[in-house]
Amino acid sequence: MINKIMEKRIAKPYAEAFFQSSILTLIKQDNLENFFKIIFDTRTILTYLICLDKLKVSEVIKIEDIIFHSNTYLTELNYFLREPLNTYESKKILLTSCFKSVISENMMDFLIYLVKKKRIAYLSSIMEKLLELFYDFLSIKFIKVDTQVKFTSSQQKILIKLIQKKFDSIIINNKNWNIKPKILLIVNVNKTLIGGFTIQIGSDIIDLSIKTDLYKLGKLLNLYMKI
């Protein structure tokens, strides 16, 4: 049984290869819609792998002449894909039945390729790594905000727009794609703040709290008292 660390090592080159292929296709076709469809496909597959827990394979595939290993009739999708006694053809049909109507042709071809290479057993890890690469590429930023009073939805939207101006658009092959990073706010209500709020972007902290202003004023007054 391969442990999780080894599984991630096996999954990494396949995820990276498909990611690079997606970027090259984006440059060649100049089509952002298709590129984002691939990202949505990745999320869809991960969702299926979670939701199709204890999948009854015999109900998904209605082909009588294909014989599956007896232990896989009542099992989860991941287990079925990992089972070496299940044939290439049975795995291909199962994946096609589950995903063909909901993912793009490129992603479907990638899944079949993984079956051929006998790497479909690591589908979950490959999709997780692929989604991570896409998120890194799109520069999805998690921004921590400490506030004395909880923000309203409209206030959060205004703050996100202001933060987005801090970041440049993504440039590929000398072309500005006008893709701004997605901002995800992690809002924490901090009652020790005396009004205002603080924003943490990576290692940078923007302090807009009254507490800090009072602290700075106090230091300034102490300095003048010593003169």
Image (spheres, helix red, strand yellow):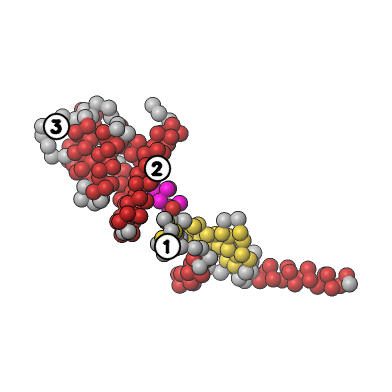
What is the spatial separation of the Cα atoms under label 3 and label 2, in whole angstroms? 34 Å
Report if residue 135 lies within the magenta region: yes
Instruction: Report the residue that reaches farthest toward the front.
Output: 174
The amino acid at mark 3 is Ile
Residue 178 as seen in the image, left or right of residue 214: left
Q: Earlier in the sequence, mark 3 or mark 2?
A: 2
Residue in the picture at 26% in, 33% down: 116
- Say which of marks 3 and 1 sits in front: 1
Q: Nearer the viewer, mark 1 or mark 2?
A: 1
Query: Is mark 3 in CB contact (under 8 Å) with mark 1?
Result: no
Give the residue at mark 3: 66
Q: Which residue is mark 1?
A: 176
CA neighbours of label 2 inside 10 A, class few (<14), some (14 to 19), many (20+): some
Percent across and percent down for residue 103 are 25, 50
Residue tagged 2: 16
Residue 32 rendering spot, x and y as whole percentages: 33, 59
Which residue occupies 61% across, 59% down? 204
Residue at coordinates 27% horizontally, 27% vertically from top-left? 84
What secondary structure is the magenta-colored segment mainly?
helix
**Is disc 1 surrounded by few (<14), some (14 to 19) or many (20+) residues within 10 Å?**
few
Q: CA distance from mark 3 to mark 1?
A: 50 Å
Between residue 217 and residue 179, name the one nearer to us. 179
Q: Which residues are magenta?
A: 130-136
Image height check: is 137 above or below 196?
A: above
Picture coordinates of residue 136, whole percent (x, y): 45, 51
The amino acid at mark 2 is Glu
Q: Calculate the distance from the C-alpha at mark 1 to the C-alpha at mark 2.
A: 23 Å
Indicate the secondary structure of the residue bearing disc 2. Answer: helix
The residue shown at (24%, 26%) is 85
Dot in front, 3 or 2: 2
